[in-house]
Each structure stands twice: as C-alpha cells, then as structure tokens.
Amino acid sequence: MQNKILLSAVNAKYIHSNLAIRYLKKYCEAQIDGIDIAEFSINDNINSILKKLYNSGACIFGFSCYIWNISMIRSLCSSLKKARPEAVIILGGPEVSYDPADMLTDNPSVDYVVIGEGEETLLDLLGCITGSGNSPSRIPGIAFRESGEIVITQPRPLIPSLDMLPFPYDGFDEFKNKIVYYETSRGCPFNCQYCLSSTIHGVRYLSMDRLRRDIKGFADAGTEQVKLVDRTFNCDISRSIDIIQYITGLGPATNFHLEIAADLINEQFLETVERAPKGVFQFEIGIQSTNSETLSEIRRKTDFDKIAFNVRRLIASGNTHIHLDLIAGLPYEDMKSFEKSFNDVYELKADMLQLGFLKLLKGSGIREHLSEYRMEHHDFPPYEVIKTGWMSYKELLLLKDIENVLGQYYNSGRFKHTLEFLLCILGASPFDFYLRLADYWNSKDYFSSSRSSNELYTILKQFVADIFSDMLNTEQSSLLNEYLKLDWILYGRSGNMPDVIMRYDHTLIKERLQDYLKNSLVNIEGFDSFKNLSMREVLKHVGYEVFSWNISEETPSKCQVVMFFPFKQDLVRMKPLFFTIPLQEIL
C-alpha cells in the first residue's frame, strides 16, 4: 500500500490550532514516512474540506475527534469512503474513546478507533496498516472489525514519561493571529464528575529542563499566545511558581494562558505573579458554583473564601487577565442557588465571567447518574443539559439569554465604567440587572439578529431610560451619558459615536484644542512620540473629547474637562492611556 498518511483536525474556530495531530505526527514520523497534517474549521464548507482531503493523495486518514467536530467528521468520513473506497480511516480523541464499538457500528466508513492516549497506539497501528508491524488484534488500545465482529483490544498503559514525546512544532510562521497550544502535564489530581480528566488518575509532568527549552522556543519566536491545556497548571504549586518565574525572566512578548485552581494559590505564587510584566499571563479559574452541596456532589470541594481572596489579589495586581467560569445545570443547583453563585462570582470583578452549561460528556461520572439527578440532555454533541431535577428547560433558556447579554456587555470589555456605575446606583444585584436586560432584549426582539458595537451602546442607554428612568436623577443621567462616552472612546470605538450619546460641540474651540495638542500635549509622557509630526499627522493618532464631568477622578466632579487619547492602544499590556485637563485651562 502507498504510504501516504494525512492526520486532520477540524477546529472550533479559525484562530485555534490542534496540538494532538502535531504530537502524533512527530511521534510517528521517526519510524513511518509520508505523514502530513491538515487543519480546518467547523465553519469551513464541508465540500471544500472533502475536496482537499481527496486531493491530498493520502490513502490513510486520521481524524482528531471532539464534541465540537464529531458530527462534521462523521459526514466527512462517509463521503470520503464513497469517493475513495480503498482509503483507511482512523478516528481518535475523547469523543470516540468511550464508545468505540458504537462508533464503528454506526459509522461503517470508519475502520479503526484509537482509544485514549494515541501516540504509541497510532505508531503501532500505522505500522500494521503499512505492512511492517503486528496484526491489529495484538495492538493495545484500538477497536476495529474482524470477520464482521467488532474487536476491542486490551487497554494500553499511559506513556510513563512525557519527555518521550518530541516537541510538537517545527516552526511558528503558520500561527500568526492564532493560538498555539502546549502542555506541561497530563492528567489532573481532582475528580470533578463533569470532566473527562476524572477518568484518568494521576498527573505526569514534562521535566523542567525540557519545558524550559520549549517555552524559550515560544518566547524567542515571538509567538502571540500560548494556551496551556494542562487541566490544573498549579496542582504542583512549587513547580508552577518555578515556571512563572522562568517565563517572567525571559521578558517575552508572548501571552501565556493558564488554567489554575484558585484555592491552591499560596502567597509565593501571588507575589511571583505580581512581579510579572503586564499582559504576559492570563488565568482561567473554574469556580463552577458556590453551592457547597453541589460542589460536594460533583466531588469538587473548594474554599470559596480562599478563592475570592486569591482572585482579588490577582486582579489587584493589575497585570493579569482573569477569566472565571460558572456552570449552569449542576446537581442540587436551582435558580435561587445559581443566582447566588452568579452574584458571588460577579462581585469578584474579573475581566471575564464565562457562563457555561453542563455537558454530559461520554465517560464522565455525572453521566452515569442521569436518572438520579432527573437530568435530560441533547442526544447530539455537545450533549448539553436540557433540564435537571432542580432546573427546568425554561429556566435554562433564561440563563442562555443572560449568558448572551453578559457576553456582549460585560465580557466584551466595552462597557467597563458604565456597568460599574449602573450597578452601583441602581442597587440591583448583578443577576437581577442582567435578567432585566435579557428580558428587555426579548421584549424588543433584539436576539433575533446580531448587533453592532454601536447598537449595543444605544440599546443599553434605551434600556436604562425605559426600565430605570424613575431611579436616576438629573445628575446621574448626565453621568451615565459621560460613562457611555468614556467606554466608547476607550474600548468600543467604531465609526461615529452613537447618536444617543450627547456630545459637546467642539466647533468653536477646535483651534484651541488642536493648538494645545500640538504644543503642549506632545510634551507629556505617552504622547511624546507624536512630537515631531505635523498637525495633520498628529490628528491621525490622537483624538479629543470634552466631558461635562471629570470622571477620571475617583469621585466625579461637575467640571468640564478635555480628554486626549491615542486611537491605537495596547490594552492587553497597558492601562488605557488618556490625559485630562480642565477645559478652562485651554480656553
């Protein structure tokens, strides 16, 4: 048989990349020739993907399978087999490892399923297919058909040392504007029943010498973002501190995304992070719920007081992006309980609060207790919960709407000052505020189509006017306008400022503002790089706006000020840059 092998990934988004197929290629190509990889997105046209697969000339096709791509991969395999009947098709990954017999029964186009960790198994299987290795029945960790029957071989032991795995990347030119994935460990010390990591016990680590070489490679290449897929990066706290210190010492332009358990953080970890440059690290922290009964049931016992303390310390450092996670639909969590969890976590004021929904993953412990929890879920991937013994489908749909507006307003980062101001003066809990906002969107049918950034500002101001007008006095309404204006200038600038935001008429003072900008502003730190440009060029880089309140102060004062700001700012690594001065000092 011609030895041409194509390992393919269908990623959830264009900006993603697939680590698994790169590990598989690197591990196998030392002994097997002719291995290539191909990456696509679930947003690609399926006929276009099929064309590229067919034209690759491969005769052995491997696919990396997850909940987000399995439906498309099944269709691709069916059509590919019809177009190339002689092709051998292999599936691997978490979405096929827990029901390999059903996968083969339901998908006659698939020839083999690799179960679990795939590097050694795929190497043996490719050797068998290409005629240089054992028969399939002697390869641990696979499922296949033999004489019309499905055979599942004995499990394969895990690779004892991760240093046996080669570095998965040849270079980084292909990853411009994409996320590069990496791992320093496999496994997780915890036993969360909604997660597949609970099915594998123990944690294996790359050696420190090996990971230092790898990390330096990312930093030297100027890779934009490296996302570690370690389930709990700081489960060995001393090791995680050593890695953070090493990365910090490199002074990289690279951003490292790490998933951590906040209740494992100690003082040394906090102090190490506090010394890091802004923008080098971002932390994802799965809190999931603050209901103690829920956490006990899913075997995720945590100390929320400790989590809250550590998260606040990380946020106070001002140099990291903090992403917190909640999961709706867990056992023993009804709407009242979830509202408390939401408010508890929202009050930590992280950069992002991800509201997710329980997925009943194949192989997860929680899926084995569906009848006990009176849970129903979709039969198709990602097997999301439909209802539980504590939460109805109607309630989950309501939380879906809250997730939508939370994402567009809070998680977008475009309304930082406005939301903080509104929640302060309205006296509403965060959950109640977003519930009312979601209801308002439903009443106006805003969910029926996507909304531009500018429309979001308009809708928010209209929402406050329609729902909370009797709760705002004249000064508060004026301040709301100024905070909307500030957020649009700093975070949401797109086209012209929305008409609902009232502006000062700059026409009569335009010359004085520009004179100050050219002769005085360029002497101030942050704006000095524009000093030798012509006025015309300066105006391409710096904008100005008059405010009726000085909202740059901790307690805003009624005073007309001018704000000057660069149009292009690196908000990941720096705080928003602007300079304010009383208008009367310019006039």
Image: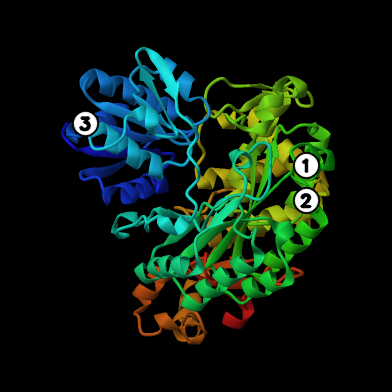
Q: What element carries label 1?
A: helix
Inspect the image, locate mark 1, and give the three-letter code of the amino acid beneath it: Leu
> Which residue in the protein does label 3 denote?
59
* Apparent side of residue 149 relative to residue 553 in the rendered image (left or right): left
Residue type (three-letter) at the residue carrying disc 3: Cys
Q: Quick check: 528 above or below 474? A: below
Q: In which quarter of the image is residue 347?
A: bottom right
Picture coordinates of residue 252, whole percent (x, y): 45, 72
Q: Quadrant of residue 377?
A: top right
Element assignment for label 2: loop
Q: Would you name the residue on which mark 1 appears?
A: 295
In the rendered image, the residue lying farthest to the top is: 148
Q: How far apart are marks 3 and 1 (CA)?
A: 48 Å
Q: Between residue 195 and residue 517, name the one nearer to us.
A: 195
Task: Tell me the element at label 3.
Answer: loop
- In percent of width and height, residue 199 lies at 61, 38
Neighbor class of circle 3 (other Cα within 10 Å; few <14, some 14-19, many 20+) is: some
Mark closest to the chain's N terminus, 3 or 2: 3
Q: Residue 413 carries which label?
A: none
Compare marks 3 and 1 and give the one earlier in the sequence: 3
Q: Is residue 142 visible?
A: yes
Disc 2 residue type (three-letter): Thr
- Indicate which label's residue lies in the foreground, 3 or 1: 3
Whole-percent x, y for residue 271 in the image: 68, 75
- Could you say which is closer to the camera, residue 235 or residue 76? 235
Left or right of 102, for residue 7:
left
Residue 302 badge: 2
Q: Which of marks 1 and 2 is nearer the N terminus?
A: 1
Residue at 54% across, 43% down: 455
Identified at 74% across, 38% down, the residue is 298
Q: Where does the C terminus fall, quadrant-wise?
A: bottom right
Q: Which residue is drawn at 41% across and 69% down?
A: 213
